[in-house]
Image (cartoon, grey):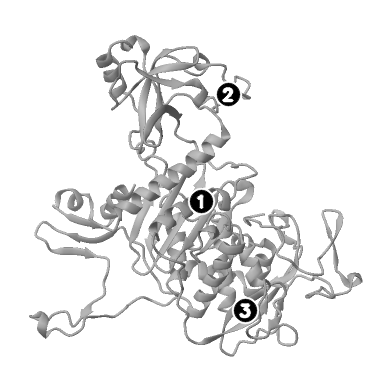
């Protein structure tokens, strides 16, 4: 996937003739070790989902039994070599069914020598894969002869225990697909890219070519627009029902949990992926401003000013999303992702170089006469560095208290990240970062369809990110993001946004970094946002509000009360609900 994407990009910029006949030397940005980790992590995640579905999709290929002799090794090896099956999956081997017994099948395995007794694939190992009957219903296979026929080509993997071979295990290429990408947040160098389960199975690169809805992973750009336009991390936003008249009827967005939580600081809205708070923020800031931010970060080229886009309804690529998150990580500087460091022609002349910075004081004839080298950054600033730090702090909260707590927060690396899950879980995402590495994962069917009720970005993609990042950051402790000048730290109550004395401690205390001159004290100086929708009077903000003053709302024909003490609520994945 990585090299094919390089070919695609250079073919477009240099032309096929120069690319293939120019004797070029191309220096790629890939880190081979991280590429191996990324490919393995994505494949493991896709295969895990597929095995949990428990559906058998038939053999990888079929060989006419009349075309080979099962007892003649040379015969079946020649037939198997001609089978069109993927051979680029680490640890997997194509195998042909030679003979079927009562509880197992004798197999011939490509690249593995025959032993005296032969190799066998136990039916009990493949029993998890249910057969689909003519009526479309799934049923358990009754035996090896019910699942396989002689001549079927399958994939197998050796299972070992303490380094010793134990058995051959059945494997199948999943129907679900996905992509993974990791890049350096300062230089844009793409360190790893995997565009699917197997390149030989499908060359379509889902990291760069698949246009999918990012769901809640888009929300940080809405919050960034708000923070750059008068909001602070302690701004109170009301989580209450919303109705929007559209040409297609009334749009009633809801939270993933189908609950309403009352007023809360915007930190809570991003950490817990609250859809209604996000829509109110987008309405208050203006979708024209949100669209400008999305385009500034290259998430979209020309984003429609529709409220549903604040919840990630538009389509973009994993490549663009990871690059956009990298700009949060580096403090708000534009960075262009690249797969190529340098291209030289056959004479050694550089015809392309990604890093355009000039090194001052690097031209002395002798090292002893050279001054200290100095590299001047030419990166464009696209966001206030304090806003970038605030978004990062909120996304660190999303990792430690939100939808990726179990998979990523448990690593204890102080990372920032956000899940994304769209309507009916057709697309699931996770994008996260440290100060120097941003990485992201996407999973879904190529022809979008629901992944199931238990499918979320935090359960499917976050573990893939965690598997990669713990190797990429091996040997490092918790990361620290640099604090930009021009602000100060204050303490607030995590639930109400109320100002607390400096140095306050406790589970509800949240230390926020705010811009100089920005008032964030709730009560008298605070800011409460309802997005322009009428929410009624006496909506409680803190503890101690009398029960009789609790606002009641009608939702789907039922009367519901907004809680008098807004809590974190249940963890939700957000999305387009």
Q: Earlier in the sequence, mark 1 or mark 2?
A: 2
Label placed on residue 132: 2
* Residue 418 at x, y percent in the picture: 55, 61
* Quarter assignment of residue 168: top left
Q: Residue furthest bottom?
A: 517
Residues at marks 1 and 3 touching, judged by CB atoms closer than 8 Å: no
CA–CA distance between discs 1 and 3?
A: 33 Å
Residue linked to disc 1: 463
Q: Residue at x 55, y 78 (%)?
A: 228
Q: Is residue 366 above or below residue 303?
A: below
Q: Nearer the viewer, mark 1 or mark 2?
A: 1
Q: Earlier in the sequence, mark 1 or mark 3?
A: 3
Q: Quadrant of the C terminus?
A: bottom right
> Where, by quadrant of the figure, is residue 43 drawn?
top left
Identify the residue position indicated by label 3 in the image.
Answer: 231
Residue 306, position in %: x, y?
61, 62
What distance separates the C-alpha of mark 2 from that of mark 3? 54 Å
Q: Is residue 151 left or right of residue 577?
A: left
Q: Earlier in the sequence, mark 2 or mark 3?
A: 2
Kindly state the secondary structure of the residue where label 1 is placed: helix
Q: Residue furthest front?
A: 162
């Amino acid at each position: 996937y990585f090299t094919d994407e390089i070919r695609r990009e250079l073919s477009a910029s240099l032309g096929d003739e120069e690319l293939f006949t120019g004797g070029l030397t191309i220096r790629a940005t890939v880190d081979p070790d991280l590429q191996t980790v990324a490919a393995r992590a994505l494949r493991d995640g896709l295969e895990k989902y597929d095995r949990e579905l428990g559906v058998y999709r038939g053999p990888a290929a079929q060989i006419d039994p009349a075309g080979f002799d099962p007892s003649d090794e040379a015969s079946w090896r020649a037939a198997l070599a001609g089978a069109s099956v993927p051979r680029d999956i680490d640890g997997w081997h194509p195998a042909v069914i030679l003979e079927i017994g009562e509880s197992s099948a004798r197999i011939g395995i490509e690249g593995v020598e025959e032993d005296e007794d032969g190799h066998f694939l136990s039916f009990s190992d493949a029993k998890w894969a249910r057969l689909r009957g003519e009526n479309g219903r799934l049923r358990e296979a009754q035996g090896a002869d019910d699942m396989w026929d002689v001549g079927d080509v399958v994939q197998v993997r050796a299972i070992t225990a303490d380094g010793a071979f134990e058995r051959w295990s059945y494997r199948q290429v999943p129907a679900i697909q996905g992509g993974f990408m990791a890049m350096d947040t300062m230089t844009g160098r793409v360190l790893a890219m995997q565009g699917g389960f197997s390149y030989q199975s499908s060359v379509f690169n889902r990291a760069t070519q698949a246009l999918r809805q990012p769901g809640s992973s888009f929300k940080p750009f809405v919050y960034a627009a708000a923070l750059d336009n008068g909001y602070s991390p302690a701004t109170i936003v009301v989580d209450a029902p919303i109705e929007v008249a559209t040409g297609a009827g009334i749009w009633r967005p809801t939270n993933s949990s189908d609950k309403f939580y009352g007023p809360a600081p915007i930190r809570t809205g991003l950490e817990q992926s609250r859809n209604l708070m996000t829509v109110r923020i987008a309405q208050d800031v203006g979708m024209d401003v949100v669209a400008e931010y999305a385009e500034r970060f290259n998430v979209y080229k020309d984003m429609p000013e529709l409220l549903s886009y604040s919840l990630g309804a538009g389509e973009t690529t994993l490549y663009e999303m990871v690059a956009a998150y990298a700009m949060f990580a580096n403090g708000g500087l534009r960075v262009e992702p690249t797969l190529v460091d340098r291209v030289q022609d056959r004479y050694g002349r550089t015809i392309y170089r990604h890093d355009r910075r000039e090194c001052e004081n690097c031209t002395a004839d002798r090292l002893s006469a050279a001054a200290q080298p100095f590299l001047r950054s030419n990166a464009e600033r696209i966001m206030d560095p304090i806003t970038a730090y605030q978004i990062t702090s909120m996304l660190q909260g999303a990792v430690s208290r939100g939808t990726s707590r179990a998979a990523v927060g448990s690593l204890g690396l102080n990372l920032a990240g956000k899940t994304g899950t769209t309507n009916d879980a057709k697309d699931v995402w996770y994008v996260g970062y440290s100060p120097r590495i941003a990485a992201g994962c996407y999973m879904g069917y190529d022809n979008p369809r629901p992944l199931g009720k238990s499918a979320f970005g935090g359960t499917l993609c976050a573990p893939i990110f965690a598997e990669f990042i713990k190797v990429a950051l091996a040997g490092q402790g918790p990361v620290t993001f640099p604090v930009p000048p021009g602000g100060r730290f204050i303490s607030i109550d995590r639930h109400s946004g109320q100002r607390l004395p400096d140095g306050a401690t406790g589970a509800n205390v949240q230390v926020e970094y705010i811009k100089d001159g920005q008032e964030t004290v709730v009560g008298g100086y605070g800011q409460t946002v309802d997005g322009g929708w009428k929410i009624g009077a006496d909506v409680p903000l803190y503890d101690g509000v009398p029960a009789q003053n609790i606002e009641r709302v009608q939702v789907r024909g039922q009367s519901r009360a907004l809680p008098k003490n807004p809590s974190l609520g249940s963890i939700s994945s957000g999305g387009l609900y």
